[in-house]
Image (cartoon, grey):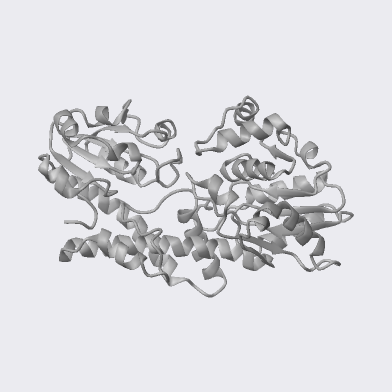
């Protein structure tokens, strides 16, 4: 497994749990040292236990030398970052292609090279070209195996997936038969629990990941727009979402109104898909609109908070509950808190925040003047307005009376709808939420 980040570490640990011998290659010395010492550099429920167990059994090891890891391997998975490329929205494949060249130089005949990273259509073909160009003597196979892991539930998603997508390059002499056999063996435990395994071509597998994430991002954006409409006409977005979600053609997931989607996948994958579609001459207007609406929404949320604070936030204290893009993760990538809190800071607010897992990564991304607190009540203490940005369960249990006694003001902007409007107003709060009166 090339890459010890979120996807590589979770996937490698779960493959080891399936019974495979897995070597994870990580070049960051600090991260590698942490992994070898049993410290997990990311927060993901259950991951530490699986890593510890499989390190102890010897099925999971951590390396900094790719040649050592590849030696004797049947398959090597590329799980490096593919961030958005500056300027055009495309995925930056620098790390993928660099890893491919290293693999080619270190590989023995018969190796299967699998892209686990989220990559644009055509990447698998380019990986095959680079392998052949770098080592003309090398016999190899190429496959695509995109991940569908939700942060905070990644172990369950990997071990009990809705589906596994495998794209196979069938242009070789055996028409991909060997690659298919290896991939089926790797995922044999998934087959035994009868989870669907879809075997297709490289291009289809690559596009499926982008299409799935873009559709879910559109679903989130749609319910956010319906929440705005509810506020204008007096509807209740919870009931609208429930009424929609009970339709089996729609489903209940990803129908939670909020300040806009973030994280490591939806923002970069929607941008990349619009770039792919544009370059292919088949522009995706729906996805383009989704990206635009989501970005504008985060700015509007900051203005919404300022309006509730009386039209000016200058010199006022803002208490903030939650910083990460979603609960049960420490991931700050594209979190709604970043543009919202930066806007409030620039408008003159004094910000004090608490997040159960995200404060350390947040320090590097948010204005230095933000004060980080030890718990939710400290973040609320002396606040003129309290803002909920992440729906951690620990926040739901806060007693309204204790909250009211801690705050200086009485305004709450609940951008995640974690509390009952009636209960909060009964406790004396000027309470606003998303899509509810």
**In the figure, is residue 384 to the left or right of 379?**
left
Which residue of the protein is positioned furthest toward the front in this rendering? 193
The x and y percentages for residue 276 are 55, 66
Name the quadrant of the N terminus.
top right
Visible residue check, residue 307? no
Instruction: Reply above or below: 181 against 371.
Output: below
Q: How many marks?
A: 0
Q: In the rendered view of the protein, which quadrant contains the C terminus?
A: bottom left
Residue that appears at 18% across and 30% down? 402
Residue drawn at 76 percent across, 45 percent down: 102
Q: Position of residue 5 (x, y in %)?
A: 59, 40
Q: Give how far across and how far down residue 17 sits, in percent.
A: 66, 42
Q: Is residue 366 visible?
A: yes
Q: Is residue 229 above or below residue 65?
A: below
Image check: 119 left or right of 418?
right
Choose between 247 and 142: the one closer to the eye: 247
- Dividing the picture into quadrants, the one containing residue 32 is top right
- Residue 384 spot, x, y in % from top left: 16, 35
Residue positioned 52% across, 36% down in the render:
42
Is 395 above or below relative to 135?
A: above
Along the viewing direction, whichever of 291 and 355 lies nearer the viewer:
355
Q: Residue furthest bottom?
A: 282
Q: Is residue 374 above or below residue 90?
A: above
């Amino acid at each position: 497994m090339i890459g010890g980040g979120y996807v590589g570490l979770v996937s490698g640990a779960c493959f080891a749990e399936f019974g495979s011998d897995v070597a994870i290659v990580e070049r960051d010395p600090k991260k590698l040292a942490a992994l070898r010492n049993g410290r997990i550099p990311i927060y993901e429920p259950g991951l530490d236990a699986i890593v510890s167990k499989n390190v102890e059994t010897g099925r999971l090891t951590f390396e900094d030398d790719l040649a050592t890891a590849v030696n004797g391997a049947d398959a090597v998975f590329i799980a490096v970052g593919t961030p958005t490329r500056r300027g055009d929205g495309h995925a930056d494949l620098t790390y993928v292609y660099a890893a491919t060249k290293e693999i080619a130089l270190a590989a023995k005949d018969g190796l299967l090279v699998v892209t686990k990273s989220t990559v644009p259509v055509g990447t698998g073909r380019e990986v095959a070209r680079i392998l052949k160009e770098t080592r003309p003597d090398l016999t190899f196979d190429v496959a695509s195996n995109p991940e569908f892991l939700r942060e905070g539930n990644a172990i369950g998603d990997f071990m009990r997936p809705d589906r596994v997508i495998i794209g196979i390059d069938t242009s070789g002499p055996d028409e991909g038969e060997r690659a298919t056999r290896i991939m089926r063996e790797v995922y044999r435990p998934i087959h035994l629990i009868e989870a669907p395994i879809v075997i297709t071509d490289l291009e289809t597998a690559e596009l499926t990941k982008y299409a799935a994430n873009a559709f879910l991002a559109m679903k989130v954006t749609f319910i956010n727009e319906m929440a705005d409409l509810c506020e204008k006409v007096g509807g209740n977005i919870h009931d609208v979402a429930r009424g929609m979600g009970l339709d089996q053609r729609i489903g209940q997931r990803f129908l939670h109104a909020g300040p806009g989607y973030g994280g490591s996948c939806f923002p970069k994958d929607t941008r990349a898909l619009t770039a792919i579609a544009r370059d292919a001459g088949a522009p995706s207007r729906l996805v383009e609109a989704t990206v635009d609406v989501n970005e504008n929404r985060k700015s509007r949320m900051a203005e919404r908070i300022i309006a509730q604070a009386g039209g000016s936030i200058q010199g006022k204290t803002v208490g903030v509950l939650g910083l990460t893009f979603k609960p049960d993760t420490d991931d700050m990538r594209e979190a709604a808190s970043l543009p919202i809190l930066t806007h409030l800071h620039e408008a003159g607010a004094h910000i004090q925040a608490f997040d159960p897992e995200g404060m350390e990564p947040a320090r590097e991304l948010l204005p230095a003047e933000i004060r980080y607190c030890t718990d939710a009540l400290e973040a609320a203490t002396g606040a003129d307005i309290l803002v909920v940005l992440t729906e951690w369960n620990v926040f739901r249990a806060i007693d309204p009376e204790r909250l009211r006694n801690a705050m200086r003001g009485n305004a709450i902007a609940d951008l995640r709808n974690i509390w009952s409007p009636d209960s909060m107003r009964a406790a004396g709060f000027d309470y606003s939420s998303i899509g509810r009166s």
